Amino acid sequence: MIEAELEELVLVRTISASSKAIFRAWTEPKLMQQWLAPDPNVITSVINNPERNGEIKIEIQSPDGTQHFINGTYQVVTPYSYIAKYWQYSGPIDVIRDIETLLEIRLTEIGASKTVLTLTQSRMKTKLACDAYKADWPNCLDKLENIFLH
C-alpha cells in the first residue's frame, strides 16, 4: 500500500516582541487563553506542561456552546526558540477531527523587540484539513500580535 503524501502548512509572521515574550505566550496558560482560539471562540480551560512528553489540553467553546478540544504531547521544548508538539483536535469539525499533526514553532529574534515566528503544521492527512487550519491560524496569530500592542 502506498501512503498518501501528507499536507503541510507554513506561516511566517514578524511580531513586535521578544522571542522570550512570544515563547511565554505559547506556554503560559493565562496567555494562551487570550489568543489560541480563532474568533469568535473562547478558551475555557488550558492544561499545559511544556516539557518533553508533557501534556497539552485546551478546551474551546463556540458562541453557540459547542465544545472543541485540542490534545497533544510536547516533543521538543527549547526555551525562547523552538517548540514541537503533537496537536490533535476532537470536536464537531469533521475535516480535522482525530488527525494528529505535528505543530512546530520557531522563534528567531531579528532585533531588540522583533521576532520572526515560523509556524509549521505537518502530517495532515488531507488538503481539506490543511485548508481548515490555514483558515484559522492567521486569526489566532493576529490575536497573538495584539497581546503585545498594549
Image (cartoon, grey):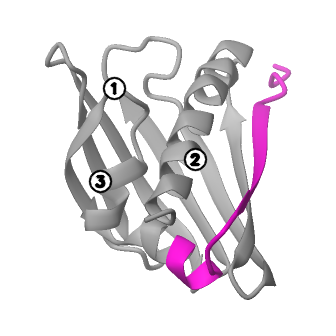
Front residue of 86/137: it is 137
- Against 72, residue 24 (above or below) is below
Decide which of tag 1 and tag 2 comes sooner along the chain: 1
Which residue was labeled with disc 3? Answer: 33
The residue sitting at 24% across, 56% down in the picture is: 46
Q: Quadrant of residue 9?
A: top right
The amino acid at mark 1 is Pro
Give the alpha-carbon distance from disc 1 to disc 2, as whole Å: 14 Å
The residue sitting at 73% across, 72% down in the picture is: 115
Q: Residues within 10 Å of mark 2 (few under 14, many from 20)?
A: many
Instruction: Determine which of the numbered discs, if any, sits on residue 141 in the image.
Output: 2
- Against 140, residue 90 (above or below) is above
The amino acid at mark 2 is Leu
Which residue was labeled with disc 1? Answer: 40
- Tell me where the magenta segment starts and ends, as one range: 1-22
Q: Residues within 10 Å of mark 1 (few under 14, many from 20)?
A: few
Q: Position of residue 27 (x, y in %)?
A: 41, 70
Q: Is residue 28 visible?
A: yes
